[in-house]
Image: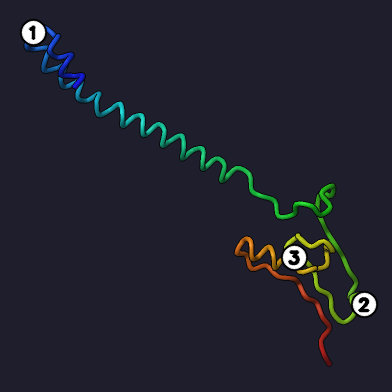
């Protein structure tokens, strides 16, 4: 509609056809460019958040240490030991069953590491 109002004010027959063509192109190009720009921004923002920094597994255990390592002698274990693998145990490195709540909340399937002596 804006193109037709501007066209009525333009003098002469030759410029009218060129002006009308340019105006119709602008009516299509401007919204397409706007949608493409906003879409590109949203996609890049989503991908940047998604791939730049991964979430940490260990959120509380020995955070001052560069690597958390626990070592046990087999003789000291006894007949059975149950170790945490979800990093949520209050008795870490031993399992206290915290993985059950974690699995329920996240849909994960993590469980403990169980070490026991062979039965003779």
Instruction: Please give the residue where the numbered disc 1 appears in the rendered image.
Output: 12
Instruction: Please give the residue where the numbered disc 2 appears in the rendered image.
Output: 75
The residue at the point 28 percent across, 28 percent down is: 29
The residue at the point 70 percent across, 68 percent down is: 100
Q: Earlier in the sequence, mark 1 or mark 2?
A: 1
Q: Which mark is residue 96?
A: none
Is 7 situated above or below 38? above
Horizontal arrangement in the rendering, residue 90 relative to residue 101 (left or right) = right
The residue most toward the bottom is 120
Q: Earlier in the sequence, mark 1 or mark 3?
A: 1
Q: Earlier in the sequence, mark 2 or mark 3?
A: 2
Q: Label 1, label 2: how many angstroms apart (C-alpha)?
A: 102 Å
Looking at the picture, how far across and down is residue 107, in whole percent? 60, 64
Q: Nearer the viewer, mark 2 or mark 3?
A: 3
The residue at the point 78 percent across, 75 percent down is: 114
Q: Label 1, label 3: how many angstroms apart (C-alpha)?
A: 82 Å
Instruction: Please give the residue where the numbered disc 3 appears in the rendered image.
Output: 98
The residue most toward the top is 11
Q: Nearer the viewer, mark 1 or mark 2?
A: 1
């Amino acid at each position: 509609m804006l193109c037709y109002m501007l066209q009525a004010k333009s003098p002469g027959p030759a410029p009218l056809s060129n002006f009308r063509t340019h105006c119709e192109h602008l009516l299509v190009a401007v919204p397409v460019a706007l949608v493409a720009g906003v879409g590109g921004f949203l996609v890049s923002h989503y991908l940047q958040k998604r791939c730049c920094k991964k979430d940490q597994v260990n959120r509380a255990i020995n955070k001052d240490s560069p690597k958390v390592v626990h070592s046990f002698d087999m003789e000291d274990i006894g007949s059975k030991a149950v170790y945490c693998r979800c990093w949520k145990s209050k008795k870490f490195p031993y399992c206290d069953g915290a993985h059950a709540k974690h699995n329920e909340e996240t849909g994960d399937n993590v469980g403990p590491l169980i070490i026991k002596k062979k039965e003779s």
